[in-house]
Image (cartoon, rainbow, N blue to C red):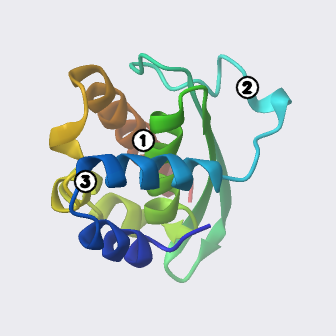
Amino acid sequence: MTAIDDIVENFALLDEWDDRYRYLIELGRTLPPMAESNHTDANKVQGCASQVWLVTHVEPAASGGPVLRFEGDSDAHIVRGLVAVLMALYSGKAARDILATDALELFDRIGLRDKLTPQRSNGLRSMVERIRAEANAALAAA
């Protein structure tokens, strides 16, 4: 999976929206495949026009608190790319770091959020809220 700093840098190199759009689709293709058994209603992110699934794995609390690893998938190419960016930003991070990271600001900074349709923007917000809820739950259980 591509590191978030590399993603930000690559978006900065792309001037045209079409190029950024293609790069986003390519990022989605780099997501590891999600097992079909994880494509369940329980894992579905509510509030997305496309189908999006998110699975959270919580690793025991270390000195920095619990660490969360995510698996994600979508049936739409663009949304799968958005999932890939969120996975690069959040997966493998401590719950406290997840809560301190503003994904929507990142999407503004790389020039993606203003190019998303209102439905995709709402879906992105729903994905971020789900990830943040998972981080809060992991902290509460620690």
Report how far apart the C-alphas of labels 2 and 3 lie in the structure: 26 Å
Report how far apart the C-alphas of labels 1 and 3 lie in the structure: 19 Å
Q: Which residue is mark 1?
A: 133
Q: Secondary structure at mark 1?
A: helix
Please name whichever residue, 104 or 10, is drawn nearer the observer in this view of the structure. 10
Residue 4, horizontal then vertical, whole percent:
43, 71
Residue 27, compared with residue 34, is above or below; it is: below
Residue at x 77%, y 31% (from the top left corner)? 38
Residue at x 54%, y 28% (from the top left corner)? 76
Asked where in the image residue 2 lies, by quadrant, the reply is bottom right
Q: Which residue is mark 2?
A: 39
- The crowd level at tag 1 (other Cα within 10 Å; few <14, some 14-19, many 20+) is some
Residue 58, compared with residue 1, is above or below; it is: above
Q: Of circles 2 and 1, which is in front?
A: 2
- The crowd level at tag 3 (other Cα within 10 Å; few <14, some 14-19, many 20+) is some
Report how far apart the C-alphas of labels 2 and 1 lie in the structure: 20 Å
Mark 1 and mark 2 in contact (Cβ < 8 Å)?
no
Q: Secondary structure at mark 3?
A: helix
**Can you say which quadrant of the picture contains the N terminus?**
bottom right
Residue 43, horizontal then vertical, whole percent:
64, 28
Question: Which label was assigned to residue 107?
Answer: 3
Residue 99, horizontal then vertical, whole percent:
33, 58
Please name whichever residue, 43 or 29, is drawn nearer the observer in this view of the structure. 29
Residue at x 35%, y 38% (from the top left corner)? 129
**Can you say which quadrant of the picture contains the C terminus?**
bottom right
Asked where in the image residue 19 lies, by quadrant, the reply is bottom left
What type is the residue that disc 1 sits on?
Ala
Residue 42, horizontal then vertical, whole percent:
65, 22
Name the N-terminal-most of marks 2 and 3.
2
What type is the residue that disc 2 sits on?
His
